[in-house]
Image (spheres, grey):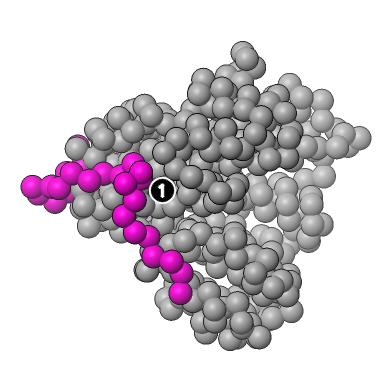
Amino acid sequence: MQEIITEDKDVLTVRKKLTKAGDLDFLAALLHARYSKMVKGDRLIELSRIQNLSDLFQSVYPDKTIEDNNDFQKKILFDFISELYGFYAYLSKDYICFINWLTMRFQLENLKILLRGFFNKIPFLRIKSFIINLPGALSLNLKKLSEAETFDEFIKNSPKGFFQDILKSAAKIYGDKTKPFFIEAFLDSAYFNELISKTNSLKSTDRDYIKPIVDQEIDIFHLMLITRGVMNYNLPPDQLKLFHVKGTAIPKRIFTALLNESDLGLFIKKLEGRVIDFIPLELTKTDQSTALDLSILESLAWKRFNHLCHRVFYTNHMGFGAVIGYIGLRRIEIFNLIVLSEGIKEKFGSDFIRKHLILKDYGEASHV
């Protein structure tokens, strides 16, 4: 089984004991204080100038000994998961249920890593370092899953409940000889459909703030199905339509059109105002003869996600929207720290690294 999360004095989690359950105001206030300490803006740009990993580790965790880049990335994820579990004492049952589903995403990501290992016959030792340590309820039976010889055996040893049921459905459609891309997309689509359902079940005063954030994350999934599935892997568009998630800014009609759009200029224009805020200058002259840098589109989509989280964090500053906005901002912080660590490791240089950071303002990195 996976390692269980234990108490860590360095984890910035909420620790104050409540006199009553559901102290959302107190949690929101703490999260605003925590946000002020987050790695962002000028500090993020300053860290991008660092030229070796040991200095980065020391800057982020001055009181910790970090062995290597993998240890660093696991540590920042470990802290985030620990922090989320620290929220539960402050929230009502409905809110806990919603955040609990967000934490299920970590279990799903571990499951997808193991699926790739199974379908591609990769030895467990080569993928073990990518597995995130999760608490008991989210842990996986790594030994049995990594030793599975058939897809049925893999499914049997997957977590009972939602994900196991989805894997059974995927097996009926695709069998055990398919590409792992389809199984992963099937799982992601099911997860996001459930997330939409749970979002719609929230009271309107919470849902109106939170749904744009949820919609954006799902539409990033839609975008990546196209950029990676069609443009990178040359998969038939008809095989990807199944994975569409209803209820976002990209309805099925638009998604189908995007899957089949051969004109890159029109493709990008259809994304504007839906999953990206605007078309940057370097993409305005894109045509059939231009090689499209897909990472630019995905980066712009995550910048929009960042903006939405930031806006909700402040407009619903003492409500559940602040909690969800904060969680999104923490995810962006983790993304940026991983970009920094990978960029420094590969010696890409500060200019290249800053180009790939998700910053609050589009021009933030250009003023260095």
Q: Is residue 48 above or below residue 189?
A: above
Q: x, y (%) of residue 292?
A: 80, 37
Residue 21 vs residue 182: left or right? left
Local crowd size for mark 1, using a 10 Å CA cut-off: few (<14), some (14–19), many (≥20) = some
Q: Quadrant of the C terminus?
A: top right
Q: Is residue 302 above or below residue 187?
A: above
> Which element type, helix, strand or loop, lies under badge 1?
helix
Q: x, y (%) of residue 186?
A: 60, 66
Q: Main secondary structure of the magenta part?
A: loop
Q: x, y (%) of residue 246?
A: 52, 55
Residue tagged 1? 79
Is residue 9 in the magenta section?
Answer: yes
Amino acid type of the residue that numbered disc 1 sits on in the rendered structure: Asp
In the rendered image, the residue lying farthest to the right is 289
Residue 360 vs residue 265: left or right? left
Residue 208 at least partly seen: no
Query: What is the total number of numbered labels drawn onto the structure image?
Result: 1
The quadrant holding residue 153 is bottom right
- The residue sitting at 30% across, 30% down in the picture is 33
Is residue 262 in the magenta section?
Answer: no
Q: x, y (%) of residue 244?
A: 59, 57
Foreground pick, 221 / 66: 66
Residue 98 vs residue 133: left or right? left
- The residue sitting at 49% across, 76% down in the picture is 141
Residue 361 vs residue 26: left or right? right
Foreground pick, 316 / 340: 340
- The residue sitting at 60% across, 60% down in the picture is 129
Residue 38 at least partly seen: yes
Magenta-highlighted residues: 1-25
In the rendered image, the residue lying farthest to the left is 19
